[in-house]
Amino acid sequence: MTGAAVSVPAVRTAARLDTQLRKQARAAAFRALGWGLLTFLGTIVAVLVIWWGVLALFNVSPMIAKGPVDVWNYLFTVPAAADNLAIVVGNLSTTLGHAVIGFVAGLVAALVGASLFQLSKGIENALMPMAMLLRSVPLVAMAPVIILVFGRDVTTVAVIGGIVVLFPALVNIAFGLKSTSPQQNDLVEVYGGGALTKLRKIAMPSSLPSFFAAVRISVPGAITGALLAEWLAVGGGVGGTMSAYISQAKYSALWASIVAVTVAAIVLYNVIQIIEDVVLARMGMSPRSGI
């Protein structure tokens, strides 16, 4: 009877503590969401101010340089605005589709590579110098070889975009997987777990901040890789039409395309950052702690 009488208040205290912790986690998530949205709005305002300020400071000819108002009119107010917007959106959709291919290819390769590095120090010592050497070669210089080997199709998009995404993501994820404490690994070993168990149970959950950092970095990189692949190999999209716009002096279309790609990159980057902040706040981790 005494044990039962003592356990009831203890259970109630534990339940109240659990409820309080859940409320704190939700509050932290909402704060992270609010700060993320505020950062996003601040980024948009800063980009517009810098854009307008640079054109005004250097007094670039309005025939070539287009400001925010010019791009807005080109897309929404001139008589041909509907057609202009449809063309820009269509090209942007193609580029984002190519970016998704490169993003997935590069991030999957980075995850596999970082996991292998965590499981085997020998694999890391053998492959990391090759990865750094490949990273030091400009992608423009490798592009003719890539096109010669893989042709001018989606495979080349995946290779070029994957190379752009792979190395920053690999470094970040590998860093995150190595951030576990020795005590956590010792605990797994005491219960009979091996290297794969330590990777799955300890290293991967602990690497979430670095993983999100890798994803944030990879999104603009994937878009850059898609533009490069379109310009050099497959054509189409924003990257494939820029040269034509320049040669035909269609500067309004050129600036509208650049703005569309930039806005897409900023939106995707900030959406991922908001998701990261909310998830890590709910888990009690410090946001943006990756390198």
Image (tube, rainbow, N blue to C red):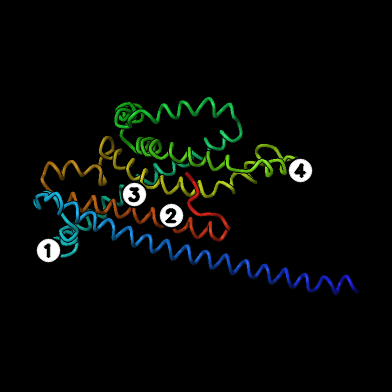
Q: Earlier in the sequence, mark 1 or mark 4?
A: 1
Q: Position of residue 245 (x, y in %)?
A: 15, 45
Q: Distance between the residues labelled 4 and 2?
A: 36 Å
Neighbour class for label 2 at 10 Å: few (<14), some, many (≥20)? some
Q: Where is residue 53 in the image (x, y as percent from the top left)?
A: 19, 55
Which label lies toward us, 4 or 3? 4
Residue located 12% across and 49% down the image: 60
Q: Mark 3: which amino acid?
A: Leu
Q: How far apart are marks 1 and 4 (CA)?
A: 72 Å
Q: In this view, does 70 lie to the left or right of 286?
A: left
Pick whichever, 75 or 61, lies toward us.
61
Q: Distance between the residues labelled 3 and 1?
A: 27 Å
Q: Position of residue 149 (x, y in %)?
A: 35, 27
Q: Which of marks 3 and 1 is nearer the N terminus?
A: 1
Q: Which of marks 4 and 2 is nearer the N terminus?
A: 4
- The residue that label 3 is drawn on is 96
- The residue that label 4 is drawn on is 191
Pick whichever, 203 or 58, lies toward us.
58
Q: Given the current orientation, which residue lies at the most extreme front position?
A: 57
Neighbour class for label 1 at 10 Å: few (<14), some, many (≥20)? few
Residue located 54% across and 43% down the image: 176
Q: Is residue 238 left or right of residue 221?
A: left
- The residue that label 1 is drawn on is 79
Q: In this view, does 25 lie to the left or right of 58?
A: right
Q: Are marks 3 and 1 in contact (CB under 8 Å)?
A: no
Q: Quadrant of residue 9?
A: bottom right
- The residue that label 2 is drawn on is 272
| Rendered position, 232 above or below 216 | above
Q: Where is residue 129 in the image (x, y as percent from the top left)?
A: 47, 26
Tell me the element at label 4. Answer: loop
